């Protein structure tokens, strides 16, 4: 799977497109690293109750992967623009995803609206178990994409921090 790079001027033409990212699997080690980084291991120092399946991928872990998964599949060209997280409109954990499942990320561009100098892009992000009829997670995510100004412009410091 190759990363698609989209220039600022081409963003409006994305509406209706779906980009499929690279299939991946998660391990227990990945889950433990997430729990340590987000202090879950500190907030819940006692082991989970025995009835909670150890191999289930926690919802916030899946959600935390969206930024990297989206960027690996669809990159807004850093030469012509930069992106900021604008928030989530809707998140649903529809069916269980487990460690070792082959997970397919896909990103459908639902809308592109002009906002100030840039665009507000609404993506439907879906993580599905390979071959499953129902997705594991669906999230509608907004990003504000701003044009990159000439070198030394007011946005250069902010742009570097946002990437």
Image (cartoon, helix red, strand yellow):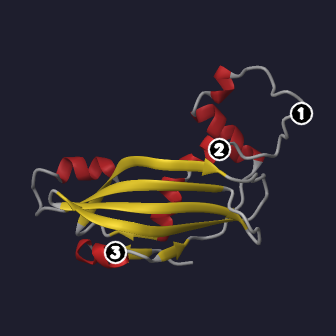
CA separation, marks 1 and 3? 46 Å
Residue shown at 39% from the left, 61% from the top:
122
Location of residue 133 in the rendering, given as x and y in whole percent from the top left corner: 75, 68
The residue under label 3 is 6
For the residues carrying marks 3 and 2, which lies nearer the camera in this image? 2
Pointer 1 with pointer 2, Cβ within 8 A:
no
Label 1, secondary structure: give it. Answer: loop
Q: Earlier in the sequence, mark 1 or mark 2?
A: 1
Residue 51 is left or right of residue 35, and the answer is right
Residue shown at 71% from the left, 54% from the top:
26
Nearest to the observer: residue 96 or residue 34: 96
For the residues carrying marks 1 and 3, which lies nearer the camera in this image? 1
User: Residue 49's image quarter?
Assistant: top right
Q: Earlier in the sequence, mark 3 or mark 2?
A: 3
Pointer 3 with pointer 2, Cβ within 8 A:
no
CA separation, marks 1 and 2? 17 Å
Which quadrant of the rendered structure holds the N terminus? bottom right
Location of residue 5 in the rendering, given as x and y in whole percent from the top left corner: 38, 75
The residue under label 1 is 51
Location of residue 13 in the rendering, given as x and y in whole percent from the top left corner: 32, 79
Nearest to the observer: residue 163 or residue 13: 13
The residue under label 2 is 59
Pointer 1 with pointer 3, Cβ within 8 A:
no
CA separation, marks 3 and 2? 29 Å
Residue 102 is left or right of residue 92, and the answer is right
Label 2: how many Cα within 10 Å (few below 14, some 14–19, many 20+): some
Q: Earlier in the sequence, mark 1 or mark 3?
A: 3
Residue shown at 83% from the left, 40% from the top:
54
Label 3, secondary structure: give it. Answer: strand
């Amino acid at each position: 799977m190759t990363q698609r790079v989209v220039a600022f001027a081409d963003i409006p033409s994305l509406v209706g497109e779906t980009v499929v990212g690279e299939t991946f699997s998660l391990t227990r080690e990945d889950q433990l690293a997430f729990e340590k980084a987000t202090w879950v291991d500190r907030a819940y120092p006692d082991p989970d109750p025995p009835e909670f399946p150890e191999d289930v991928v926690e919802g916030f872990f899946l959600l935390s992967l969206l930024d990297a998964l989206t960027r690996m599949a669809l990159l807004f060209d850093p030469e012509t623009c930069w992106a900021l997280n604008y928030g989530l409109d809707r998140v649903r954990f529809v069916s269980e995803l487990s460690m070792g499942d082959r997970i397919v990320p896909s990103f459908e561009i639902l809308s592109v609206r002009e906002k100030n100098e840039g665009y507000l892009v609404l993506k439907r992000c879906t993580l599905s178990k390979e071959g499953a009829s129902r997705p594991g997670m669906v999230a509608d995510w907004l990003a504000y994409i701003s044009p990159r100004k000439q070198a030394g412009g007011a946005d250069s410091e902010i742009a570097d921090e946002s990437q």
